[in-house]
Image (spheres, rainbow, N blue to C red):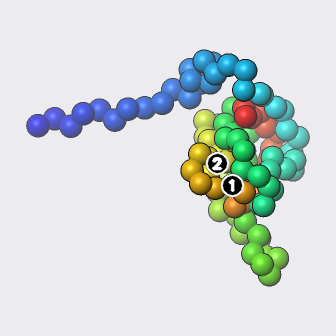
Amino acid sequence: MVPEAAATLDAEAFLRTIGKGRTTTRLARNRTVFAQGDPADAVFYVQKGKIRISVLSKEGREAVIAILGRGEFFGEGCLTTQVVRMATATALTECLIVR
């Protein structure tokens, strides 16, 4: 038996079909997209640049949990039961993101 091919998402094609709710934003280096504890109300897509995802402990120590680049989504916790952001997203470089 030959396994079925895995379905893949053409994110760029998908984003071209989204209507009124989509916005595109240019971010300068070190600009915060959202902070830990902010309302989780949108998903983002990196079209250009690098985004750092980090968490802050109760003791004030920061841990980087991901570095995201072109073609990656972040903030997807809002699609489940997450009502606040569990991490902070910051532009490492100049970025172009879609909300």
Which residue of the protein is positioned furthest toward the left in this rendering? 1
Separation (CA) of disc 1 from disc 2: 6 Å
**Could you tell which of marks 1 and 2 lies nearer the N-terminus?**
2
**Residue 17's spot in the image, x, y percent?**
60, 18
Q: Quadrant of residue 47?
A: top right
The quarter in which the C terminus is drawn is top right
Splitting the image into 4 quarters, where does residue 62 fall?
bottom right
Residue 67 percent location from the top left of the image = 67, 53
The image's mark for residue 40 is: none
Task: Check contact, mark 1 vs mark 2: CB within 8 A.
Answer: yes
Q: Is residue 77 visible?
A: yes
Location of residue 30 in the rendering, given as x and y in whole percent from the top left corner: 87, 50
Q: Quadrant of the N terminus?
A: top left
Q: Secondary structure at mark 2?
A: helix
* Image vertical order of residue 70 relative to residue 67, above or below: above
Q: Quadrant of residue 14?
A: top right
User: Alpha-carbon neighbours of circle 2 within 10 Å: few (<14), some, or many (≥20)?
Assistant: some
Residue that label 2 marks: 78
Q: Give the amino acid type for the residue marked by disc 1 in the picture.
A: Val
Question: Which residue corresponds to the image point at 43% horizontal and 32% vertical from the top-left?
Answer: 8
Q: Work out whether residue 48 can be spotted.
A: no
Q: Is residue 11 above or below residue 55?
A: above
Residue at screen point 66% across, 37% down: 45
Could you tell me the amino acid type at mark 2?
Cys
Q: How many tags in the picture?
A: 2
Residue 83 numbered tag: 1
The kind of secondary structure element at disc 1 is loop
Against 65, is 27 above or below?
above
Up the image or down, 70 lies above or below 83; here it is above
Disc 1: CA contacts within 10 A as few (<14), some (14-19) or many (>=20) = some
Residue 27 percent location from the top left of the image: 85, 38
Question: Which residue is depicted at the point 78% across and 78% down?
Answer: 58
